[in-house]
Amino acid sequence: MTAMTVSLRGIPETEACLGWAGTHSIVVDRPEGRAGGKGRGFNGGQLLALAIGGCFCNDLYYVAYEMGITLTHVAVDVTVAFDGNPLRATSADVRIAVEAADESADIDALIRKAQETSTVSNSISRGVPVNVSSHR
């Protein structure tokens, strides 16, 4: 089993949070004017879309490497729809454009295999449980 841990802490005097994993960091905030948000960073919905798309990008490169394909262009756009109260993600639409150095490369197979192995997409679509606990 593999586990990954990230940490987030409030940034003093901002009402935003700094999140990090290893040497990488990101600012998380609410949109400007929403519950004290100043738009200083990504909100949770944007991070969800970035997680889906970022994982898919990585998977495209992983699969291309395994298939011996050199990618020359990768573009992934993700739209996540939200509905309900409380608001929750109801669907995610992933649009992909990929080009390879070898014009005869099987791009459809590449995309299909990336979709089959995409950790975040598969976790979300199968309903990963989220457990919340308090530690003081």
Image (cartoon, rainbow, N blue to C red):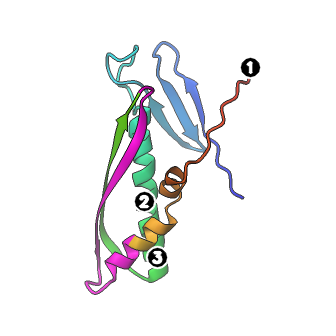
Rendered position, 37 above or below 120: above
Label 2: state its secondary structure: helix
Q: Position of residue 121 (x, y in %)?
A: 47, 55
User: Does label 1 or label 3 sit earlier along the sequence?
Assistant: 3
**Residue 108, percent across and down?**
33, 76
Amino acid type, mark 1? Arg
Q: Vertically, is 101 above or below 84? A: below
Q: What span is colored magenta in the figure?
A: 85-111
User: Which of the marked residues, 2 or 1, is nearer the chain's N terminus?
Assistant: 2
Nearer to us of marks 3 and 2 is 2
Tell whether position 9 is magenta.
no
Which residue is farthest bottom? 104
Residue 16 vs 132, above or below: the answer is above
Q: In the rendered image, which residue does mark 2 sit on?
A: 56
- Residue at image position (53%, 58%) is 119
Residue displayed at 57% across by 44% down: 23
Instruction: Give the residue pinned by disc 1.
Output: 136
The residue drawn where x is 42% and y is 30% is: 87
Spatial CA span between label 3 and label 2: 14 Å
Q: How many residues crowd mark 1 within 10 Å: few (<14), some (14–19), many (20+)?
A: few
- Identify the mark at residue 65; answer none if there is no mark: 3
Task: Please tell me which residue is depicted at 32% across the width and 16% down the height of the picture.
Answer: 33
Cα gap from disc 2 to disc 1, whole angstroms: 36 Å
Q: Residues within 10 Å of mark 2 (few under 14, many from 20)?
A: many
- Between 10 and 121, the one lying in front of the other is 121
User: Looking at the picture, which amino acid does disc 3 mark?
Assistant: Tyr
